[in-house]
Amino acid sequence: MFKSLYTKVFIGIVVFDMKSKIYVELLDRHNNITNVIVKDFNSLVVDDEMYIFISKFINKTPFYYISVLDNSTPQGMIATCLEDELSNKIDLDIFHHTCHKDKWAFYVAKQDIDILKNNYIKIGLDFIFSPFAVMVEFFKDKLDDEMVLFILMQDDSYAMSIFDEGKLLYSDHHVFNDDNDSYKLLSIKESIEHFYKDLIYDSGFINSLYIADTTDNDEELKRYFMDEMFLDANIYNIELHVEICRLAKAELNGV
Amino acid sequence: MGYSYINSREKSAFTPRVQMLFIVFDAVILLLFGMYLFFIYQDSKFSQQMQDIKNNTIKVQNDISDLSEKIKKVKEKELFCEKIYTKNTLLKDSTKNIFELFPKEIILSKVILSDDTLILHGKTPNKQLYNTKLQIPLHSIYSINKTTLKPLDNGWYEFSSINESKKR
Amino acid sequence: MRLTPSDESIFLLALSTFLLILILLFSFLILVPKMQNYRTQDIKLQEITSTLNTYKKIKQQLSLSLEKSKITNQHLLAALKQDFDIEVFYNKYKNYFKTMQICKEKSPKEYDLYDINTILDKSSYKIFYNFIDSINKSKWIIKIDTPIRLKRDTKNDIDISFSIKVYLPSQSHL
């Protein structure tokens, strides 16, 4: 009833490079952003410093939403929401899935969800987002393109998906223990080749490539894809912490 | 919308502090309202009591006039009877006077004794005796005296005396 | 970055103020008049109760007074209720006289009139005083009417004749 009178707080937590980046948006009752705060913490879990920082915002209002990006593996996307079709592709006892617009399902290991919830138990979590969800939202106006490859590139992981005129053909997700760029790029190349070779689908070559990149390696990436795959990469800078807050608002419908 | 793996927690504007506030104010308002109801109840009780007392007062006033009336009646009866007793006693005294007053020499044949009147008929040996022994005492008691003396053959006189007294 | 006081605090403050105003309004506009009314009613009640008590006292006093009066006058009050029996009267008073005759003369509204003819022994004429005293103390209300007629009897006794008025319970004026 009085929700509209309260300030709303959106908190996005993204883990990268052994650090936690915490992004805070304060919205007034008209849903206009009144304040934005970003802070990095040298901890992967909610330590005292992080807790004190977050508490300041949580105590302002009962309407706060904490969102976190799930980078666990295995994760992926499947082009169906139907239970029986899904059960053919993944073991539904092990994997939890979320249906998106009745078209695709994002899946993740139930265990990994629990681990994540446990890590943030001090502050609690309202939303856990798959990197694929971020990707689909970020590139939503390009989903209907012909044979398009999307890559969400992070420091130590990537997620990729191939769409053809709005239909999901392929998805893949990898997490790396070390910060070896060349190894990462090789893995991507192999993944694409895997798509080409193992074609159950009678589709052509990839037309366009869009990359949402958190790293600062624009030039390197462009060169690699052009050299190795003859693909002209369109690279976009993405702030994951901002994106997951955007997703959170979308989840709350119209914020 | 289908982006998040989990659903957000329930958020309520009704935080514990707000709830506490409502509880406190509800208690206060309840108290005040309770007082209000108490006063309403008292109103009706008062009007009931007022009515009772008014009725009682009327009843007692009626009783008072009743008793006054009864007392008056008793007084009336008392006065009435006392008057009778007094009259009787006066009569007794008058009778006493007559019996005692009269000298032996004078022979009374008839006496009519009323409230203020005394009529005597009798015989007296002589006028002197009559005058001294009868007339004079009668004068002192009765203001109006009328005597007629009639001589008899044997020297005696027959008298009739009408005496009236104006005093009460 | 300095944070403004939390929304919740502002909301609480606004709510508190609103509720406080509500309570104050209610108290002063409704409750206080009711309290004053209660007080005036109480005073009124006390007044009329005190008046009632005064009346009760008066009633008490009058009641006492009536009882006293009844006791003081119990003889005559009883006498006024006493029915007259000519036989009883005759038997009671015949011994005062040598002879006595009594007969009912008339009964006007207020009393019964009786004629009494007696012959009194001359030597004991004083007994007539006792007779009258006894009439006064008798269990009836009897007035000896005037005139009394005394006549010398042939035997030198006194012939006394008079009337008595006997006041009976049925007489309306009492």
Image: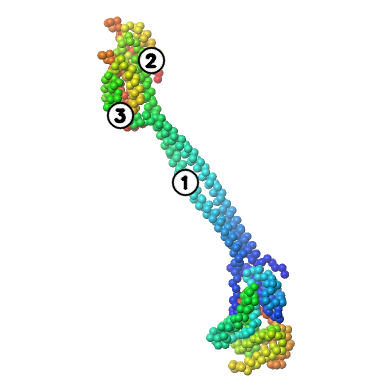
Q: Position of residue C148 (x, y in %)?
A: 32, 19
Quarter where residue B151 is shown? top left
**Rendered view: A168 above or below B106:** below
Secondary structure beneath disc 2?
loop
Residue that mark 1 sits on = B51
Residue type highlighted by circle 1? Gln
Residue in the foreground of this view, choosing between A84 and A49? A49
> Who comes first in sequence, dot 2 or dot 1?
1
The colouring scheme, among rainbow, by chain, secondary structure or one colour, is rainbow
Residue C84's tag is 3
Residue that mark 2 sits on = B142
Q: Position of residue C43 (x, y in %)?
A: 54, 45
Residue type highlighted by circle 2? Tyr
Give the letter of the chain under mark 2.
B
Q: Position of residue B111 (x, y in %)?
A: 31, 15
Residue type highlighted by circle 3? Phe
Question: In this image, B104 relative to C50: left or right?
Answer: left
Q: Residue furthest left?
A: C154
Question: In this image, C85 relative to A192: left or right?
Answer: left
